[in-house]
Each structure stands twice: as C-alpha cells, then as structure tokens.
Image: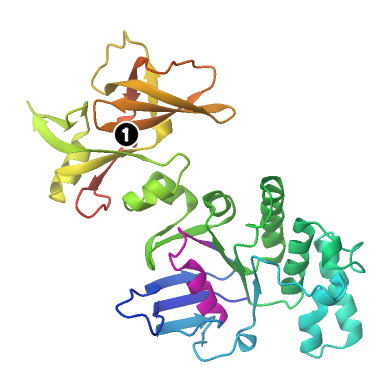
Amino acid sequence: MAGVTLVNTSKVYPGVKNAAPAVNAINLNVNDHEFVALIGPSGCGKSTTLRMIAGLESVTSGEIYIGDTLVNDLTPRARNIAMVFQNYALYPTLTNFENIAFGLRVAKVPKYKITEEVNRVARSLELDGMLDRYPRQLSGGQRQRVALGRAIVRDPQVFLLDEPLSNLDAKMRVQMRYELIELHKKLNTTTIYVTHDQIEAMTMAHRIVIMDRGIVQQIGTPSEVYTRPANTFVGSFIGTPPMNFIEGRVEIVNDIPYFDNQSIRIEITKEQYDKVSANKAHSVYLGVRPENIHPVSDTETDNKHTIKGRVRFTELIGADQNVHIDLGKRDRVIVRMPTDMYVNDGELITLRVNVNRILFYDMNSGNLVS
C-alpha cells in the first residue's frame, strides 16, 4: 500500500482563453490506508484531480507522488492504481468472470492464478454464483460490485473511485455504502473517492476534501467540517439543511457583547467578541446549524439568547421537520424540530439560540473568525 501526495498540483486546459485553472495549486496528503473523499459542486475540479492521480489527465504544474515515487510522467499502468468509474465500464460481451480477470490477463498472470484470484475476490463481494453470467443479467449494484472486483483483483496500491454510486437508486446506494465501508476495512487499501453526495462523504471517509472552483476550501474529518466550517461556502454546502447565516455586527453595550442587526439581538460570549474583534471583522455573518436553534415557551424568562420569528412553511422529513422561519423582513432561518412539535404557517414563535454553538464569519472574505 502507499499514500498519495499532491504538491501545488494544478490543471489548466489549453485553448481556453483567460480560463481559470480547473484545479488550482492543490496540496493534499492522503495517508497510507486512509479513505479520503473529494466533494464539491459540479465543475469544482474533484474528478480532474482524481484523473491526474490516475494518469488520465496530465499535470500542468506541481507534483504527484504515490508512496515515494514521483508519478507525473508515469503511465496509468505503471502507477499501480485501480480506478472504478461511474458507468461501471464493463465489457458487455464478456462474462463477469472475464471482466474481473481482464487486468490479470493483460498482465499475463498464469491461468491457474487468475482463476484462484477471481474466485477469491468474487467470494468477498458475494459474486461467486454470478461469474458465468453477463453484466446485462445483473442489477446495478451487482454490476458495480463486478467493477470493484476488477479493481480489487489487481491488488493495487491505491483505489480511485469516481462517483461509483451515482447511477444507483437511493436504496441501493445505502446498501453499497455499507459494502464499501466493509470492503475498505477488509482490504485496508488507500482509497480516494470522488462524490457530489455529502452523505456518502460524511459516512464513509476518514477525511473530506471540499473543493470549489478548483480550490480546496477545507480538509478535515466529517465532524470537523460539519461543526467548524472554514468558510461560508463549506457551511452552506455541508449539512442538510445547510448552516443558517445571518448578517449583522458584533458590539459592546454596557460592557455586554452582542450580535445585532435589524431583526435580532443576541448576547454572545466575551471570547467570541474578542476573536471577532481581533480579526477586525465587526461586520459578520452569524452561523448556526438548524439543530442548535430550539423553540421555547412564549413565557421564557431568559431572553438573552432568544429571538422571535414567524413560521413560513414546514418540510416533513420523517422523524424530523425543517421549519422555515422569517426573522423580520430580510432574515430567514431553518430550525430542525421533532415532528410531534406542532407549528402552524404564520405562527409567531420564540426560539432559543445555543450561543455556545454559533460561529462568526468575516462578511468580506467569508472566512471563519471565531
């Protein structure tokens, strides 16, 4: 096995005048045996990054290492990686056995060894009763397992997976997530996984790399990127529903620190005020997750951390509901509530904000300041 390191790696496509880089000076260190997910909106550069690691795209500048080997000029075959694609890329005229065995035959592995290895991989993927069939005779999930088997059988240093579950229905995606998690535990192979689905990234990866317009916005564990987004883009991209952002200012009134705008006024901690002040960012966005705002009784006596709003509409999502609430004329927040807590459209309700869970972002840069 081997880790993967990208050093100031960029990709600029020729022939596009004044085009921004598809990938802009990315620095990333994927540890040996680690599972890392690259995530971001369409066109953010995540698949281009994966293809540069695989050798399917040339590197405009920077360096890529697999283990201790600089691989910029190596062919994909010489990099000892295996890639699984979104569209399976199986040969329809070959049996599943032959599809899995294809790379071994190209490498001129002895026939007895091919049979042994294909059967071993098929058992691990629960495909051993399907090897004589053709891909068209399998479900989408089974075909994806055949594609995984073709990658696994080569015993590569690194697995590269490019949105492998996006063609599956919702139920099959959940099942395949579990199977990929178990497969990584069993094989312990360094894995880089590209997806636009944040749930896939959050549930499977040890660390997540969030990209936007070719630039890495944040690298961290699922918990880190969810609880402390590095900027407003990450806060709005990670989380369903996303983090709430409210524009305003922090100020001191009678030695008490507040966040204030035309709609709300909340007492904040001295530590939060000092961090914002130290960054000279008094005009800020207050960021708070929907689960950190709670409805309370209208008779709530502690009004230091409460706000009032009017229910706009409600989205039922099973055990919870997302309640959209207007705060004055310009601000709106989403609050996550249990479904047994009834609210009506147009109702005026009181909400308590968990002040220890709020974050502040510079209004100009969008970066976290507290």
Colour basis: rainbow
* Of the pair 222 and 176, the residue shown nearer to us: 176
| Percent x, y of residue 142 | 79, 59
Rendering coords of residue 59 (x, y %): 45, 84
Q: Which amino acid does label 1 sit on?
A: Asn
Range covered by the magenta-colored residues: 37-54
Secondary structure under badge 1? Answer: helix
Q: Read off the residue under disc 1.
A: 356
Dot 1 surroundings within 10 Å: few (below 14), some, or many (20 or more)? few
> Residue placed at 26% from the left, 52% from the top?
366
Spot the residue most to the top: 299
Name above or below for residue 46 compared with residue 231: below
Determine if the magenta segment contains residue 291: no
From the viewer's side, name the closer residue of 178 and 232: 232
Q: Residue at x 80, y 61 (%)?
A: 125
65 w.r.t. 24: above or below:
below
Q: Answer with left or right where residue 178 lies relative to residue 40.
A: right
Screen quadrant of the N terminus:
bottom right
34 left or right of 296 in image: right
